Image: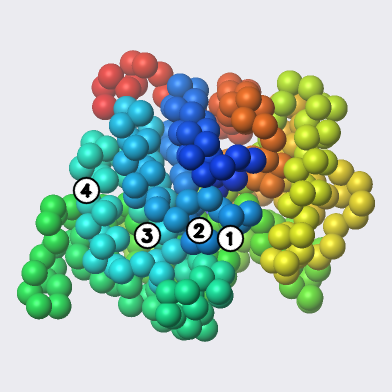
Amino acid sequence: MKRLAHLKRLGFFTRLLDQAGPAERYRLATEQIVQAEKCGLDSAWIAQHHFHEPEGGLPAPFAFLGYVAARTSRIRLGTGIVTLPLEHPVRVAEDAAVLDLMSGGRFELGVGTGGNPTAFAAFGLDSAQRSEIFSSNLDIVRNALAGRPLVGGDTLYPPRPQLCSRIWQATFSVSGGARAGKAGDGLLLSRTQPRSKDAPRATLADIQHPIIDAYLAALPAGCEPRIMASRSIFAADDHQEALRLAGIGLRRALPNFMAGGHLPPGDTVAEMITAFDTHVGAPDEVIASLRNDSILDRVTDLVFQVHSVDPPHPCILRSIELVADKVAPALGWIKETAADVALV
């Protein structure tokens, strides 16, 4: 089992699920990303979801990240993910190129098959064909960014071939890990996954180690691995307050959790925290919990989110600060200093 040297980069991730209307969700998420930059984080990632307000609050990731780019100056900005089968691939390439230019080369393009089956129906597509559509669309995006002629002979403007080395693929499967590796793309691992009937008590690491193995085995010689693990982390100054807020949020998220194919958790907050693959508590408790996650020994990037605890906005801002100042350094992350930034 290959291990990587240390955690290179730390990021914040949001699905824009604050308990508010859409305009306020976007404002709060922007503030959270600005806070992440102030705390020295390397990246911020947002998810795209069409429809289904409780699952995700943003159908237009490029528009949102364009606004965030204007509010920030250093932090890298990524999509985690663009639901590529539901998008026109040439438009994805165009939007990605413009966003990367306008942000000063700070954009990371994460893509995946994603999407609720009813969302596919709304776009006139068959969700059973999502993998085939994804593969075809990704080829078009990659060719367009690389400057190769499109059908009809046109080429992308503005050109942005450097984005080809900043594509990431999200997957739940070993085959998906191999696909990302073969392409030389980054690998995006999820914060949680449903357990199979054959292994109902498997840990998240049990599921994801084979995905990493397949990714590394397929990676072309000389290609630097990029492996990102998303994890649910909520750190607070007070242990009891962290558990209280976790109980509220996880119970609220339980119906969607069960609908996603997960096993029913127990009734206690501790059992729900375990079932949701969530790391909750004061910083020392979160550090101890994350040290039990052997996947983190093999990733280049850790991206954390407060879902499905989804505490109030001020608590999210404080959690970002605690993870940056106390939790991530204990896992080997080194915060970039002002002098480092000046040299870039």
Residue 274 in sight in this render: no
Q: Secondary structure at mark 4?
A: helix
Q: CA distance from mark 1 to mark 2?
A: 7 Å
Percent across and percent down for residue 123 are 43, 74
Percent across and percent down for residue 164 are 26, 57
* Residue farthest along the top direction in this orientation: 339
Quadrant assignment for the C terminus: top left
Q: Residue at 23% x, 39% y: name it.
A: 102
Q: CA distance from mark 2 to mark 4?
A: 21 Å
Q: Nearer the viewer, mark 1 or mark 2?
A: 1
Percent across and percent down for residue 163 are 26, 52
Q: Nearer the viewer, mark 4 or mark 1?
A: 1
Is 264 or 173 nearer to us in this picture? 264
* 10 Å crowding of disc 3: few (<14), some (14-19), many (20+): many
Q: Secondary structure at mark 1?
A: loop
Q: Residue at 26% x, 62% y: name it.
A: 91
Q: For residue 288, which quarter of the picture?
A: top right
Is 103 or 287 nearer to us in this picture? 103
Q: CA distance from mark 1 to mark 3?
A: 29 Å
- Label for residue 98? 4
Q: Could you tell me if the residues under marks 3 and 4 are in contact, i.e. CB atoms within 8 Å?
A: no
- Label for residue 52? 1
Instruction: Kindly identify the amino acid type of the residue bearing the numbered disc 4.
Output: Val
Instruction: Kindly identify the amino acid type of the residue bearing the numbered disc 1.
Output: His
Instruction: Kindly identify the amino acid type of the residue bearing the numbered disc 3.
Output: Asp
Of the image marks 2 and 4, the number of the one nearer the N terminus: 2
Q: Could you tell me if the residues under marks 1 and 2 are in contact, i.e. CB atoms within 8 Å?
A: yes
**Which residue is tagged 2?**
49
**Which residue is tagged 3?**
185
**287 displayed left or right of 103:** right
Q: Nearer the viewer, mark 2 or mark 3?
A: 2
Q: CA distance from mark 3 to mark 4?
A: 21 Å
